[in-house]
Image (cartoon, helix red, strand yellow):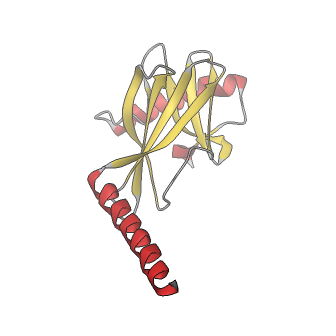
Amino acid sequence: MRKSLFIVVASFVLIGVLSYFIFIEKEPTHIIGKVQIKGISNLYFDLEQENDFDMATAIYYGISTESNLTVAPMKFLIGTHDYIENSTGFSAASVDSIVYLTWGDTTEVYAVYDLRTGNGYPNRIESWEDEIQIADSLTEILKHKKPYLIANWNK
């Protein structure tokens, strides 16, 4: 009886593990979650992570409404060595039309986006210098109301 129970349980575990790896291989990314933006109701940062692990695995961000209308399409945010399962370590807030995302330390900005102009960071525009200039100018606007914020890309 115990031997047959062990075989059944082991079979289910093996099938579950194999199914998990098969699923991971088929899906290029997994959803980390949504992070509600404080100060703007019904607006969220959407986070996804690549499933193909390498030296660093990409995390992507986008911005959407509660009804899943895209405000800003998915863009590369940062690479990490960690497998992120949920959005609990992320936080988002706004100052006027500028929204920003932090990870871990709520004073360290990883992404910033101006809802009025559509400019943001990271954005992966052709010129790295132009992208950093946009990021720094948006961060300076944030610092007028929240001087404790620091830009992750300037560390």
Instruction: Report the number of discs.
Output: 0
Residue under the point 40% across and 60% down: 56
Q: Nearer the viewer, residue 84 or 135?
A: 84
Q: Is residue 113 above or below residue 82?
A: above
Q: Nearer the viewer, residue 4 or 9?
A: 4
Residue under the point 28% across and 35% down: 126
Quadrant assignment, res 40? top right
Residue under the point 40% across and 56% down: 57
- Percent x, y of residue 44: 53, 27
- Percent x, y of residue 136: 52, 32
Q: Residue furthest top?
A: 116
Quadrant assignment, res 72? top left
User: Is residue 17 shown to the viewer in this render?
Assistant: yes
User: Is residue 53 shown to the viewer in this render?
Assistant: no
Q: Residue furthest front?
A: 1
Residue under the point 54% across and 22% down: 43
- Percent x, y of residue 93: 63, 28
- Percent x, y of residue 150: 63, 40
Q: Is residue 32 above or below residue 14?
A: above
Q: Is residue 109 above or below residue 84?
A: above
Q: Nearer the viewer, residue 141 or 96?
A: 96
Q: Is residue 108 above or below residue 95?
A: below
